[in-house]
Image: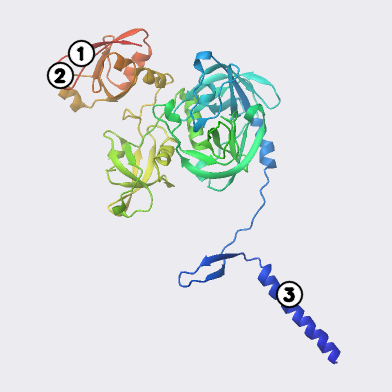
Amino acid sequence: MKKYLAVVAISVISALSAVFLYEKFFSEDPQIIYKDSASSDFVSRPIISSAPVIPTDFTVAAEASTPAVVNITAVVKSNNAPQTGGFWDFFDQPRSGQVTGSGVLITRDGYVVTNNHVIAKGDNITVTMTDLSEHTAKLVGRDPSTDIALLKIDGYDFPHLTFENSDDVKVGQWVMAIGSPLELSSTVTAGIVSAKGRSIDILGRNAQFPIESFIQTDAAVNPGNSGGALINTSGKLIGINTAIKSNTGGYSGYSFAVPSNIVAKVVSDLRDFGAVQRAFLGVSISRKIPAELNIDRGVYVEDVRQGSGAIDAGLKRGDVIKNINSVNVNTMPELLEQAAQYRPGDFVDVDYIRNGKNYKTKVELRNLDGTTRLIKNNESELTNILGARFGELNDSELENLGIGNGVKINMLGNGALRMAGIKTGFVITSVNEEPVANVGELMEKLGNETGIIYLEGVYPDYDKIFSYSVRM
């Protein structure tokens, strides 16, 4: 009997020991060490919620997506070679009279998105598929402000990628970069999203109104990756790889992609209008919120532009904008990213704080002219040639100037109008002796003229008619 009792006792002791050891070393509840604020000792507490770790498999997404990512070659004229940019840089430079990069098929009938800097200085654009078939590409349009260009190749039933909502992209999620780095086509690299809303001041070299709100990743990219795909593990397109941070021109751990929501909007505009329909909220933003406001996040409104949708919606200097269409905005790039997804005439919901209270308003987005007019395919280039931004006059302004029609120059930069001696504030009343009443009429008349054109108009402080000869 004693023998059996001993066996039972040993069994019980062994079982209890096993439970103790399991709980101590193999418990499914992970432990994390915290510093107890009330004690100098460290205490061990279980994590309250622990999501299961699921291994990430990139093979399915890579296999499905790679055929839609193509190689792009453009012949570069000797006097058109792109300039290198130093620490922050685009990562495709011309070699042997051509520049190479990547592109992404986004429709079955052959629309291809790439970077503007890949094709901007070249012509005779060739798209090479993963099966090595070659297609001559037509340039549909390009946008230096976002570094996006749209190409078209003939054919049908091409493999293509679909856009994912880049607002849903999370820091820390797995992503893959697909492109043709170092002339190695169909190369896939993986990494995570390191940050969102990054501005690296690179697009301002070639654009008057750059929009930078890049997705930053640590997926390896190198020369040749420009214009390639950044996808999630479902194989959806979340960005177009564009730039790297590097001392050498090679990969150093940081790469940047244009978010898919901006890409989708830009290529849609280029396809439908031949030009990007740029929409603005109409506010100037400070990067820092005054400490006395005691607000944890948002963007501080320094100024509200006259004639903008923001001022008509009641926004004022000192307001703090927190959300646009329920998306958090904490920096100017994030604000620009949200506005860049819409066209003039669209409305957005704006959540803001004033004097410690929460408010919501609906703002009509407008173009820089203060209107909701959609521009035509040649107007972006024409505006750059003229170097000006225009605005329309209300009845009161026309009466004060003593004129019946006219278009005023709101902003004046380098271009044909400044070269002719015209100054900001000039009101154009006629082009080649034909009257103009609004911005649309002015752009139409200027767009149809070449060589020397004659502008007449007035200045607010002078009681006389001024005439200028402008070389287009």
User: Can you name the residue that lies furthest to the left here?
Assistant: 463
The disc label shown at residue 462, or none? 2
Comes first in the chain, label 3 or label 1:
3
Q: Note whether residue 30 is visible.
A: yes
**Around disc 1, counting alpha carbons within 10 Å, would you say few (fewer than 14), some (14 to 19), or many (20 or more)?**
some
**SS under mark 1:** strand
- The residue lying toward the viewer, choosing from 365 and 246, is 246
The spot of residue 140 in percent (x, y) is 52, 21
In this rendering, the label closer to the viewer, 3 or 1: 3
Instruction: Kindly identify the amino acid type of the residue bearing the numbered disc 1.
Output: Phe
Reply above or below: 56 against 219. below
In this rendering, the label closer to the viewer, 2 or 3: 3
Res 53 quadrant in image: bottom right
Res 58 quadrant in image: top right
Instruction: Kindly identify the amino acid type of the residue bearing the numbered disc 2.
Output: Tyr
* Separation of residues labelled 2 and 3 (CA atoms): 97 Å
For the C terminus, the image quarter is top left
Comes first in the chain, label 2 or label 3:
3
| Residue identified by numbered label 3 | 18
| Residue identified by numbered label 1 | 466
| CB atoms of marks 3 and 1 within 8 Å | no
The spot of residue 113 in percent (x, y) is 55, 28
Reply above or below: 156 against 178. above
Q: Is residue 384 left or right of residue 438?
A: right
The spot of residue 290 in percent (x, y) is 30, 49
